[in-house]
Amino acid sequence: MSRRDVVVVGGSIAALTAVEVLRMEDFDGRITVLSEEDVPPYTRVPLSKGVLAGTESIDDIVLAPLADDVDLRLRTAATALDLDTKTVHTPSGPVHYDGLVIATGGRARRLGTPDQQERVLRTHGDCARLRDALAAASSVLVVGGGFLGMEVASTARALGKEVTVVDLALPLDRLLGTVVGGYVRSVATQAGVRIVVTDGGVRLQGAPTPTGVQLVDGTRLEADLVVSAVGDVPNVEWLAGSGVAVRGGLVVDHRCRVAPDVVAAGDVTVTSVGDGQLTRSPQWTNAVEQARTAVQALLHGDAAAPYRPSRYCWTEQFGLDVKMVGEPDAQGGPAVLDGALDSGSALLAWPDAGTPRTVIAVNHRTPPAKLKRLLRPAQGALLC
Ligand SMILES: Cc1cc2nc3c(=O)[nH]c(=O)nc-3n(C[C@H](O)[C@H](O)[C@H](O)COP(=O)(O)OP(=O)(O)OC[C@H]3O[C@@H](n4cnc5c(N)ncnc54)[C@H](O)[C@@H]3O)c2cc1C
């Protein structure tokens, strides 16, 4: 190929995977990685689990080091993109590319006002601050009952804290369906977590350190430590004015392409699902799989295979290891492939065992690769 300079913007799993795939594909040109982080790429997954609990350190979660011939520039944020001149701008000067991979991920969404020092969990720095605050707290209020919020609740509870989770809907139903969502919630409440569902928004109270939330009916919930776990926001601001399409994330096509010689992967992206709708999958496996597709598209164009997501994700909380493939809308009764939820280990399929669209393993030994294969016969549709 004629490209000699590939620039990867981002410093986490999508960026690292892009670099690995470039080398696996025998790209022998120069690779420059621009990361605004102060440490080499690490995995965020344990930040709500072992690192927050204090059983793992940041050194334990650094991902495989980049090869010596990769120019990793830490503390270097991309500030603008010029598609015409093929330049990424940074505070330390412009960087030319022949091929560009955008992997700038997301940041924690915040509820509060600028004068509030809201506790969130996205980076290793957030985690260190949260861990210290957790050590000093007796009670914790987690705002948001998605995977992240419930994992934080689980870790806090395991550390002996009094834990309340507040959300606008029953935690986890949207992500895992009512059957498994209800089961995980029941385990959480048996572990002593209090779950509050409020019909309307919550307002973060207290400044500079939040001390609680106010619900629409006027009820106040207070705790020594308040943690916001209300989703993430794609890091797209640096692309403003560049001409790339941004609609709730950086829009990629079915080969993760953004513009000529520009591809993107991971939490920063939104993908068209064919009927004009855009979907975002801010999960680890999606970041890895998109990075593979994106680099192949950068190197091979239309000859590259289109993005075919496995739609695999997982969460670990309250002693449960929950792995899921397929649509996150498993409603109604599942077909039981093995075990039983009541016994604490189950392999479940929706809508039936023959052509499942969703398979969930709860504390079940089925490895991820086998789970993905269970879904394959029914999974004809490509994201495109
Ligand atoms: C605490 C926590 C626990 C999680 N647990 C799970 C789990 O159990 N299972 C699961 O499937 N997923 C989990 N996730 C989600 C998963 O970690 C993300 O989907 C994944 O990190 C996305 O990778 P990414 O590389 O696309 O983006 P990110 O991880 O967000 O990385 C983006 C990188 O780009 C850098 N960057 C941003 N802007 C710029 C810029 N302008 N210039 C240069 N660099 C920039 C950032 O500093 C960062 O290094 C978890 C996430 C968190 C926060």
Image (cartoon, rainbow, N blue to C red):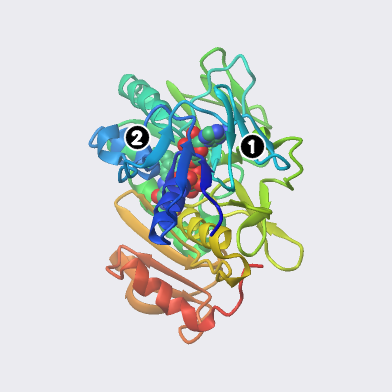
Discs 2/1, front: 1
**Secondary structure of residue under mark 2:** helix
Q: Is residue 117 left or right of residue 339?
A: right
**Secondary structure of residue under mark 1:** strand
Q: Is residue 176 left or right of residue 158?
A: right
Q: Nearer the viewer, residue 337 or 24?
A: 24
User: Which of the labelled discs sits on residue 87, or is there none?
Assistant: 1
Mark 2 or mark 1, earlier in chain: 1
Q: Which quarter of the figure has residue 254?
A: bottom right
Please provide percent x and percent y for residue 78: 58, 32
Please provide percent x and percent y for residue 195: 48, 42
Q: Is residue 139 left or right of residue 117?
A: left
> What is the three-letter code of the residue carrying label 1?
Thr
Mark 2 lies on residue: 156
* Residue at 53%, 82% in the rendered image: 378
Q: Nearer the viewer, residue 139 or 14?
A: 14
Above or below 369: residue 206: above
* Residue at 56%, 66% in the rendered image: 307
Could you tell me which quadrant the C terminus lies in?
bottom right
Above or below 230: residue 337: below
